[in-house]
Amino acid sequence: MNRSELQDQLIQQVLDDMDLKTMTQLCYDYLDEGYAKYSDEELITECEEYYPELLES
């Protein structure tokens, strides 16, 4: 088995063992880390494109 196959199997096993709450937290952390790198303008542009209602309040 090569590294890529082993890594794939490990990832699949970790995901299979996660409950929804843990997977949601992992996804939140991933998105939070990514959006933290955006400038204010980039973040506003992202909201305008996908969720403009967030900017209405």
Image (spheres, helix red, strand yellow):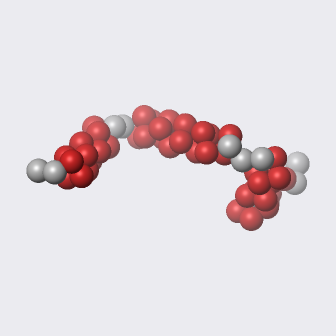
Pick out the residue farthest to the bottom: 49
Q: Position of residue 31 (x, y in %)?
A: 58, 45
Residue at horizontal 16 percent and vertical 51 percent from the top: 2
18 lies left or right of 31: left
x 79%, y 59%: residue? 45
Image position, residue 30 (x, y; %): 53, 42
Q: Residue shown at 61%/45% (left/top)?
A: 34
Left or right: 55 in relation to 24: right
Q: Does residue 29 appear anywhere in the picture? A: yes
Examine the rendered structure and indicate whether residue 23 appears above or below residue 42: above
Figure quadrant of residue 19 = top left
Q: Is residue 14 above or below residue 44?
A: above
Q: Is residue 22 above or below residue 11?
A: above
Q: Position of residue 5 (x, y in %)?
A: 20, 52
Asked whether residue 9 is in view, the answer is no
- Residue 1 is left or right of residue 17, and the answer is left
Q: Residue furthest right?
A: 57
Residue 27 locus on image (x, y percent)? 50, 43
Name the foreground residue: 8 vs 3. 3
Q: Nearer the viewer, residue 38 or 29?
A: 38
